[in-house]
Image (spheres, grey):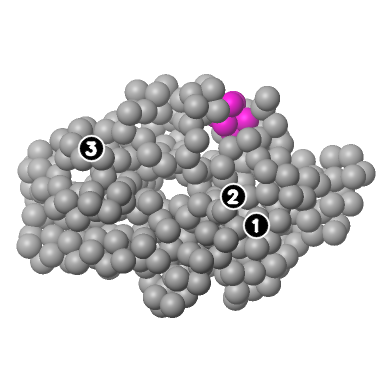
């Protein structure tokens, strides 16, 4: 699924050959084969461990629990997420929300003790050939959006913002394109650094035109930018599709990884619906001492309240690694 379609459809409000096997056949099958207590929880539209926090800090997004908490009101969904034990959220579209709404979300997150995860630095050029060209118009748009992102981050208490450099400029050598991207990112880092905001570069797998493809490539760019405000967003779904070898690559790039996202493959649904052994990955992250957010940037295998309860139970199962 392309990230643009993923956003448009409302699924959002944006390591390893060792990680094969999956948590289970899929979230629905897991739920229906659980004991009577879990089945009853699904029928009631709630998780079987209502209110209990997780070992890791998973972050749902707007629309993920719309049937259980009420569609169209993100604040009610945030309260529902809290009641289910989640202590973080993410919202790729936060930059596009009215300033007053951003502030209300930030106030509620602060009151509940919930962390704000990523939102996207959306210049309008993320899904076209842009920063790789070195053209001033794209750099200017990026700088302006970075400045706008600082103000948004202040309102909603955000620390991370996703950056997508756009598509390849295939008329230029790769080294020249890379230099152009590095130059633009340095300008962005200069804006973010004084505010403690971190832009996280996301290598993607949606189509072959995207400039940023692998964690290793992102690692080199972050080293070149050389700023605490320029790090990697390691999206496990995309990295499984592009390179696999998830845990070793994650370890190699660890010094530059500031944020992690989740999605099983194939299908980009919750853990347990595909081939990735998320229980092993979560255990590995826990043992490494990772205290950051794991963004739930994926769809849902089931439908309605039952599907949402099954999704929570899938996370309870994958999180049960101690």
Q: Quadrant of the C terminus?
A: top right
Residue marked by disc 2? 87
Q: Position of residue 206 (x, y in %)?
A: 39, 51
Q: Quadrant of residue 77?
A: bottom right
Q: Is disc 3 placed on a helix, strand or loop? A: helix
Chief SS of the magenta region: helix
Observer-side mark, 3 or 1, equals 1
* Residue 226 shows in this picture: yes
Residue marked by disc 3? 222
Residue drawn at point x = 47 percent, y = 60 percent: 91
Q: Toward the viewer: 196 or 37? A: 196
Q: Is residue 187 left or right of residue 245?
A: left
Disc 3 residue crowd, few under 14, some 14–19, many 20+, Cα 10 Å: many
Residue marked by disc 1? 81
Residue 281 lies within the magenta run: yes
Along the polypeptide, which appears first: circle 3 or circle 1? 1
**Dot 3 and dot 1 residues touching (CB under 8 Å):** no
Mark 3–mark 1 Cα distance, whole angstroms, equals 33 Å
Q: Quadrant of residue 260?
A: top left
Q: Is residue 48 left or right of residue 222?
A: right
**Dot 3 and dot 2 residues touching (CB under 8 Å):** no
Q: Is residue 188 left or right of residue 36?
A: left
- Look at the picture and state if 39 lies above or below 290: below
* Residue 203 shows in this picture: no
Q: Position of residue 271 (x, y in %)?
A: 62, 41
Disc 1 residue crowd, few under 14, some 14–19, many 20+, Cα 10 Å: many
- Extreme-right residue of the structure: 36
Observer-side mark, 3 or 2, equals 2
């Amino acid at each position: 699924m392309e990230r643009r379609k993923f956003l448009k459809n409302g699924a959002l409000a944006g390591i390893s050959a060792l990680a094969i096997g999956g948590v289970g056949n899929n979230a629905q099958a897991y739920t229906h084969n659980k004991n009577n207590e879990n089945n009853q929880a699904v029928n009631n539209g709630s998780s079987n461990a209502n209110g209990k926090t997780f070992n890791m800090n998973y972050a749902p997004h707007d629309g993920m629990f719309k049937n259980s908490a009420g569609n169209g009101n993100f604040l009610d969904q945030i309260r529902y997420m809290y009641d289910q034990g989640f202590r973080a959220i993410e919202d790729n579209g936060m930059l596009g929300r009215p300033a007053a709404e951003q502030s209300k979300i930030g106030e509620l997150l602060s009151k509940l003790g919930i962390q704000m995860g990523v939102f996207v630095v959306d210049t309008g050029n993320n899904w076209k050939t842009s920063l790789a060209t070195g053209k001033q118009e794209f750099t200017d748009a990026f700088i302006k959006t970075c400045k706008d992102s600082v103000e948004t981050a202040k309102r909603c208490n955000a620390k991370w913002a996703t950056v997508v450099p756009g598509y390849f400029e295939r008329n230029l050598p790769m080294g020249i394109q890379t230099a152009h991207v590095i130059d633009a990112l340095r300008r962005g880092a200069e804006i973010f650094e004084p505010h403690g905001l971190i832009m996280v570069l996301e290598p993607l797998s949606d189509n072959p035109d995207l400039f940023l493809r692998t964690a290793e490539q992102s690692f080199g760019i972050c080293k070149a930018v050389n700023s605490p405000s320029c790090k990697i967003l390691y999206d496990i779904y995309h990295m499984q599709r592009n390179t696999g070898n998830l845990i070793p690559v994650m370890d190699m790039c660890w010094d530059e990884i500031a944020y992690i996202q989740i999605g099983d493959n194939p299908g980009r649904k919750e853990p347990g619906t595909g081939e990735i052994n998320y229980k092993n990955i979560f255990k590995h992250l826990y043992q490494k001492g990772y205290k950051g957010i794991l963004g739930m940037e994926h769809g849902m295998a089931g439908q309605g309240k039952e599907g949402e309860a099954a999704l929570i139970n899938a996370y309870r199962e994958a999180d049960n690694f101690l």
